[in-house]
């Protein structure tokens, strides 16, 4: 089993970070996907499938774990040359306040180019999520000050 790990910190709370993960429509704003659609248009949760699009990819995933404010896991169904790909995003309270985001992916096999894409995507997504949560927190505090 091969592993990809990324970590990023944000002054945002776990609930503030979770609000970005929970709202699939926001992923195109903070992530690298051009669109993300939840099958059936309902809320995300265990067993729900979603489609993420960024040319030339059209990736299908299934949510395998959904613990609001804490953990979100998913598995790749199709759309990339990778076998056994699954990933978990974990949110933890940071020692000095804020949140530590950990994005950990595992896969059995992937083509060489896909391996590069997956590594870059996991690290980039983790960083982008932290940056978006920080920006949202700043915008919220400016409105309330």
Image: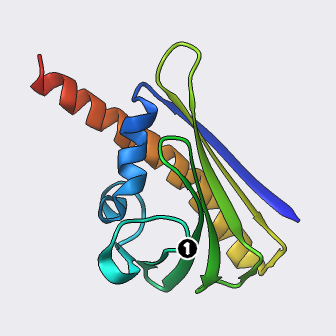
Q: Residues within 10 Å of mark 1 (few under 14, many from 20)?
A: few
- In-front residue for pair 16/11: 16
* Residue pictured at 41% horizontal, 58% vertical: 31
Q: Is residue 35 left or right of residue 125?
A: left
- Residue 131 on image: x %, y %: 40, 39
**x, y percent for residue 135:** 30, 36
Q: Quadrant of the C terminus?
A: top left
- Considering every residue shown, the one lying at the far top of the view is 96
Q: Residue at x 58, y 86 (%)?
A: 79
Image x and y of residue 2, in percent: 85, 63
Q: Relative to 81, is 15 above or below?
A: above
Q: Is residue 23 above or below residue 103?
A: below
Is 35 left, or right, of 21 in this rendering? left
Residue sitting at x 27%, y 37%: 136
* Residue 25 position by quadrant: bottom left
Question: Where does the N terminus fall, quadrant-wise?
Answer: bottom right
Q: Image quarter for residue 8?
A: top right
In the picture of the structure, the residue carrying the numbered disc 1 is 47
Judged from the image, the secondary structure of the residue bearing numbered disc 1 is loop
Which residue is pictured at 42% across the width and 63% down the height?
32
| Residue 97 visible in rendering | yes
Residue 119 visible in the shown view: no
- Residue 105 % position (x, y): 71, 59
């Amino acid at each position: 089993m091969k592993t990809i790990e990324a970590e990023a910190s944000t002054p945002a709370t776990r609930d503030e970070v979770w609000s970005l993960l929970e709202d699939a429509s926001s992923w195109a704003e903070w992530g690298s996907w051009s669109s993300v659609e939840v099958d059936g248009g309902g809320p995300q949760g265990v067993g729900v499938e979603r489609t993420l699009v960024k040319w030339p990819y059209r990736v299908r995933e299934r949510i395998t774990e959904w613990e609001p404010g804490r953990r979100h896991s998913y598995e790749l169904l199709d759309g990339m040359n990778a076998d056994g790909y699954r990933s978990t995003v974990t949110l933890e309270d940071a020692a000095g306040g804020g949140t530590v985001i950990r994005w950990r992916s595992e896969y059995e096999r992937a083509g060489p180019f896909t391996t590069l894409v997956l590594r870059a995507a996991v690290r980039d997504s983790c960083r982008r999520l932290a940056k978006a949560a920080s920006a949202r927190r700043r915008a919220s505090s400016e409105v309330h000050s």
